[in-house]
Image: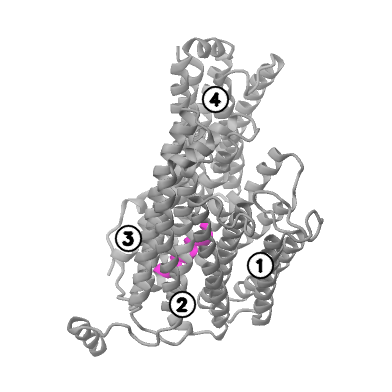
Amino acid sequence: MAEPRNAFEDLPGDLMMWILIVSELLVFGAGLVAFLSVRIADPNGFADAQATLHRTGAGVNTMILVTSGWLAAMAAVAANAGSLARTRVLLGGAAALGAVFLIVKGIEYADKAAHGITFETHAFFTFYFLLTGFHAAHVAAGIVLLGLVAVRCHPRTVEVGTAFWHMVDLVWVILFPILYLLG
Amino acid sequence: MKYQTQKIAYAYFVTAMALFAVQVTLGLIMGWIYVDGNFLTEILPFNIARMLHTNSLVVWLLLGFFGAAYYLLPEEAEREIHSPTLAYIQLAIFILGTAGVVVTYLFNLFEGNFLLGKEGREFLEQPKWVKAGIVVAALIFLFNVSMTVLKGKKTAITNILLMGLWGLSLLFLFAFYNPSNLALDKMYWWYVVHLWVEATWELVMASILAFLMLKLTGVDREVIEKWLYVIVATALFSGVLGTGHHYYWIGTPGYWQWIGTIFSSLEVIPFFGMMAFAFVMVWKGRRDHPNKAALLWALGCATLAFFGAGVWGFLHTLHPVNYYTHGTQITAAHGHLAFYGAYVALNLAIITYAFPVLRGRDPYNQVLNMASFWLMSGGMVFMTFTLTFAGTIQTHLQRVNGDFFMDVQDQIWIFYVMRFGSGVAVVLGALLFIYAVMVPRREVIEPGPTERAKAEQMAAE
């Protein structure tokens, strides 16, 4: 007796990747809710702390990561079309832009460190370092993952790898306005 | 019994249940010490009784896990256990170590001795020679079960079970690190205490539950494996960084408050997953397995683990809440129901499943066993409620009003009396359980006309 197909079986890529993506979104979501809750108690302190952030750098980083996501999406299309070389080039481009993102991020952290700003400076920075640091760790992991699926290049594996990468840029697109811009 | 070496599990389960009886009896004694603070102060100081209560719990649960592994691995891997002799040597080491611990604690022998004396910490205080013995026994065990699986069939259940057992054994090595800085000591012991019960033990729990569901409900292995992977992934995702909820007020940096709060909040997910898994499997199941008692324990385990570990854990895991409730009876309430639901009930489920087979009495209805489930679980749930109420009042009086600890203890005395009552129910339930699996030789209750008709119909098919 064949059971009716359920929605889980129609997910692109792998169920476990979607479990991971949903878990990550829960963590970042909870982190942002906590950030916004603590901010209510000290709006001025948060605004002052936010003013020290480098908005232009983060804006450039947003464009870098979104472009990288676009390359990853193109890679998934190319993989489905069966074009192995093109898939690998596109994945390489996506990973390279991910590395550029990390370099810009590193410069930002170095600048904060030079000004003596740490986790403990203010509640704002506790969240700033936790959320962007955790995100940066995922960018690094994503670069490794993109490399892996470029080596083991099948439409399904590319779909799994790029799904993770889209989660990484989606999270950034939410982090950026809330941490850097929200007035 | 398909494989002769499954018999090894019998010795492990019997030893585990003997220690279980010791553990709950000590619990009852401590329950009375809460009522009458001077009870046994000279003979059995409270801190010693507490060490024995928690240590015997951990050791009997581990013995149960080992027994479960020896029972289910041959069926899963489709071959005999690599070496029964090694398995019995391993058990002997554990019994020797446990006896050594009990004697050392009770008479406070070799105090201050590097090798033979207890270490005087709150957790992982066993004498070094016992810890070394545990490592040797664990190595023997890992060798034995890994050889069995490597030579046999590998399934998701055996893979996850071995992952959990390897993980918990390796993490135990942190028990040897005993820095003189108390904050560091606390930081590292959670690598054992937390990463056992909220990570690696969950893998063991999920795989044993999966084995039971496979046998009891007859649902396809493929479906069970998918659930198993999802549960394990969410358990590790939330549980590992969830360690942060032990780092709130011990001198670690402040960011742990948010890491612990966020990740440990998600620890409820795998426990919810296990509960959903157990019930969905039973609903989907096509097999009417005669061992209803094992099914009752398995469902009870998943449900009480969700409430005890999941809900009661969440109750005080957010650091703004824990700031007030830390170390009150709220913690005790959570600890009792979490350990009972997740790991005690799990062991009793696999024992209930395996015993009729191991003793050649399959099938029989185990009505007494089911009665013990309701008595023990009812007692434990009542205890959880009394301690929760006690903890709520204690939090208010002590942490909000700032009253003195001992004054507050007097105020919540009535709850300790009620808790002692529920403790009596738990101990009676435990003894009834042991009697029910060890003694009766045939059905306690004759089947009625409906059951007989069903049996005849099944026989005709």
Q: Which residues are magenta?
A: B202-213
Q: Which residue: 78% across, 56% down? A: B111
Q: Are marks 4 and 1 in contact (CB under 8 Å)?
A: no
Secondary structure character of the magenta stretch overall: helix
Mark 1, residue position: B98
Residue A106 in magenta? no
Same-chain status of marks 2 and 3: yes
| Label 4 vs label 1, nearer the camera | 1
Crowd class of label 3 (few under 14; some 14 to 19; many from 20; radius 10 Å): few
Mark 3, residue position: B280
| Label 1 vs label 3, nearer the camera | 1
Viewport quadrant of the N terminus of chain A: bottom left
Same-chain status of marks 1 and 3: yes
Check disc 2 and give the amino acid type: Ala
Mark 2, residue position: B354
Describe residue B447's horizontal placement relative to residue B153 as left or right.
left
Mark 4, residue position: A127
Same-chain status of marks 3 and 4: no
Query: For the residues marked 3 and 4, what is the alpha-carbon distance in whole angstroms?
Result: 39 Å
Crowd class of label 4 (few under 14; some 14 to 19; many from 20; radius 10 Å): many
Q: Position of residue A40 (x, y in %)?
A: 43, 17
Q: Which residue: 62% across, 56% down? A: B51
Q: Which residue: 52% across, 67% down? A: B20
Query: For the residues marked 1 and 3, what is the alpha-carbon distance in whole angstroms?
Result: 39 Å
